[in-house]
Amino acid sequence: MSGNDLVSIVMPAYNHARFIEEAVQSVIDQTYKNIEFLVIDDGSSDSTFELLQKMRPACEKRFVRMVMERQPNQGTALTLKHLFSQVKGRFLTSLASDDVLHSDFVQICYDFLSKNNDYGAVNVESDLIDEQSRTIYWNRYFKSVSSMEAVYHTFGDFLRHIHQHIDFKSDEFGRYESLLRSNHIQHGLLSRRGLFEQADCFTEKAPLEDWFMVLQIAKQTKIRFIETPPLYHYRWHGHNAIKQHDLMRNFAERTLRHEAQLVAASGDLNLQKRFQSAFPYDRFFFKSSWLDIFRRHTLEGAKITVKVLGMPALVIPESLITWVKKVLLS
C-alpha cells in the first residue's frame, strides 16, 4: 500500500555537523513518496546549517514541500512547536538531527495508521548506533559489547526489560496513566496531525519534550506499538542529553510539575482522577520515567529515592510530591 496522504517529517537541528547529512539523507531515502520535510537550525555554532544548505537542492527535488530555516537558539521544545505549527501533512513525525530513519519507517507506520483509525499514533522498534553509524548492543551497564555478550540488542529490549509491568502488545502500552509512571515510548513515533491541533504539546515549561508530547497524545487517543525490525536508529554518543543526570532530573521535575498544573487547571474531573490513579496508595510512583535508566525504587519516609545503576541515588524532593498532591486534591 503506497498511500496518497501527505506525511510531514520535522527536524530540529543543533550542533550536529557530524551527523546532519546522514540524518537528512535517511529522510530523502524513504520509500514512501508523498513527504514534506521541515528543518530548522536552532542557532548552531558549528557548520550544521551550511551542510543543510548543501543538501537543499536534493531536498527540493525529493520532497513535495521543503522548509529549511535558521533561527537564534530557542531550545528543542520551542523549535518543535514552530515546526509543528507549519506542517500540512495528515500524519507527522520528528527526527533528531543526530539519528537515522530506516528507509521503510514512514511506509510501515503509515500502513498501520491508515488501516487502524482507532489509534492516533504508532510506535516501532528502535536500535542503537554509535558515532560511526555501527549498530551497537548494551550490557546491563550500558556499555557497548558484542551481540553475543549483550543483554539488550535493541533499545526496545532495554525498555521492555525495565517496564515488565507493561505488555507492549496490549492497550496498556501508551496509556496516559502508564506514561505518567514511565515513559516507555521508543524513538520513532508517527502520529495524526489532528492530535496536535487539540493540545499544546511543546512548551519551555516542560523541557522533557518527548515525554510531555506523548502525555498530551495519550490523553486523546490510543498509541500502538507494532513489532518490526528496528526502523529508528538512535545514536549513542558522547553528548546525549540523557547522560547529564542532574539536568535530566531537573527537566523531569519541571515537566511533571507543568503537567500537574495543566491537569488541575483543566477542570476535567475524569482527567484528574486518571492522573491521581497513576500514583496509587496515596504516593507517587516513579519508575524509569525520564532518564530511561531507573532500575528500582524505595520509599524512605517522606521522600522517594530512586536507585540508579552505577550512580548515586537520585532523590525526588518531598516538596514536589506534596505540591502535586495539593494541586490535584484541592
Image: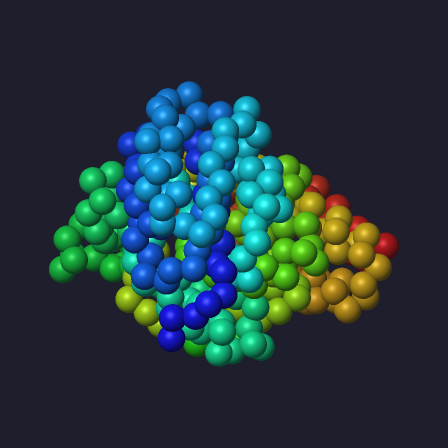
Could you tell me residue 184's position as x and y percent?
Answer: 47, 60
Which of 100 and 125 lies nearest the eye of the viewer?
100
Colour option used: rainbow
Residue at (37, 22) in percent of width and height? 46
Q: Is residue 206 above or below residue 228?
A: above
Q: Which residue, as the protein is rendered here, is positioned at the far top?
A: 45
Count the marks: how many?
A: 0
Could you tell me residue 273's position as x and y percent?
Answer: 75, 67
- Is residue 230 left or right of 85 when viewed as pictured? left
Which of 58 and 119 lies nearest the eye of the viewer?
58
Residue at (35, 38) in percent of width and height? 57
Residue at (74, 65) in percent of width and height? 271
Q: Note whether residue 307 is visible.
A: no
Which of 163 and 295 lies nearest the eye of the viewer?
163
Q: Note whether residue 209 is visible.
A: yes
Could you tell me residue 301's position as x and y percent?
Answer: 63, 50
For the C terminus, the quadrant is bottom right
Quarter of the image where one finds residue 3: bottom left
For the N terminus, the quadrant is bottom left
- Is residue 263 left or right of 116 when viewed as pictured? right
Which of 186 and 104 lies nearest the eye of the viewer?
104
Could you tell me residue 267's position as x and y percent?
Answer: 84, 59
Residue at (32, 69) in percent of width and height? 228
